[in-house]
Amino acid sequence: MRPRTTKRLACALALATLAGCGHSPPTRYFSLDAVPPSAPLATAKASMAPVQLGAVRVPASLDRPEIVAQDARYQVSVRDDDHWAAPFAQMIRRTLAQDLLARLPPGSFVLPGAPAPTGARGIVVTVLDLRANANGQMTFEGSWTLTAGEQATTVMTQEVSLTEPLSSSDSTAIAAALSRVLGQLADRIAAALAAQR
């Protein structure tokens, strides 16, 4: 092979490689949004001891920048081009806090990270499983715990199993369904706190 032909082939190969790199899809970023209560709540005018959302614990397999979907039994897909806009557990905590703020009596919910008044109770949410599956459902399995006192003594723990339909397998639909699931969770927590107060 002639040296000139070899150089031309090398240049063509380099240009093809660069062109291939230039066409990778852009990364898309998704957030979660608060949703209104599913029904009017009796807590709106009630008085309630202050409560603060503390930790939200998420499995390591889900607590990652990429959106994760369940393709089949035992098989998940990590969407390299679709990312959460913030660390996943922090985004769940922020969205759930917004949901609870809209559902609990004025002045009774202390924002996460804010100084809490003496005697404020705490809420810890534990996510056991959270999956967007091929059957067209978002499923949440987990629990929430109410604590009180300086030693964070457990007052109440409730296990929760929630589902929401997925309009498609797209990441936008996953974010929307998860937002609605967190709204359901906030409904459950607000109703239990109203009954417990």
Image: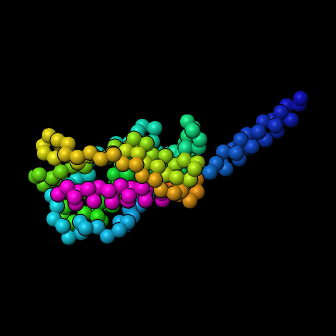
Residue at the location (86% across, 35% down)?
Answer: 5
Q: Residue furthest right?
A: 1
From this view, report whether residue 38 is shown above or below residue 5: below
Q: Quadrant of the C terminus?
A: bottom left
Magenta range: 176-197
Nearest the camera: 16 or 194? Answer: 194
| Relative horizontal placement of residue 128, taking residue 111 as reference (left or right) | right
Q: Determine which quarter of the picture holds residue 150.
A: top left
Q: How many marks do you count on the picture?
A: 0
Q: Can residue 177 be found in the magenta stretch?
A: yes
Where is residue 137? Give x, y as percent: 52, 52
Where is residue 125? Give x, y as percent: 31, 46
- The secondary structure making up most of the magenta span is helix
Residue at the location (38% across, 66% down)?
Answer: 38
| Relative horizontal placement of residue 31, taking residue 94 as reference (left or right) | right
Q: Determine which quarter of the picture holds residue 21.
A: top right
Q: Can residue 52 be found in the magenta stretch?
A: no
Q: Quadrant of the N terminus?
A: top right
Nearest the camera: 36 or 34? Answer: 36
Residue at the location (35% across, 68% down)?
Answer: 39
| Relative horizontal placement of residue 4, taking residue 166 as reference (left or right) | right
Nearest the camera: 64 or 192? Answer: 192
Residue at the location (59% across, 43% down)?
Answer: 71
Where is residue 181? Give x, y as percent: 42, 56
Residue 148 in view in this figure: yes
Where is residue 143? Give x, y as percent: 33, 45
Q: Residue furthest left?
A: 118
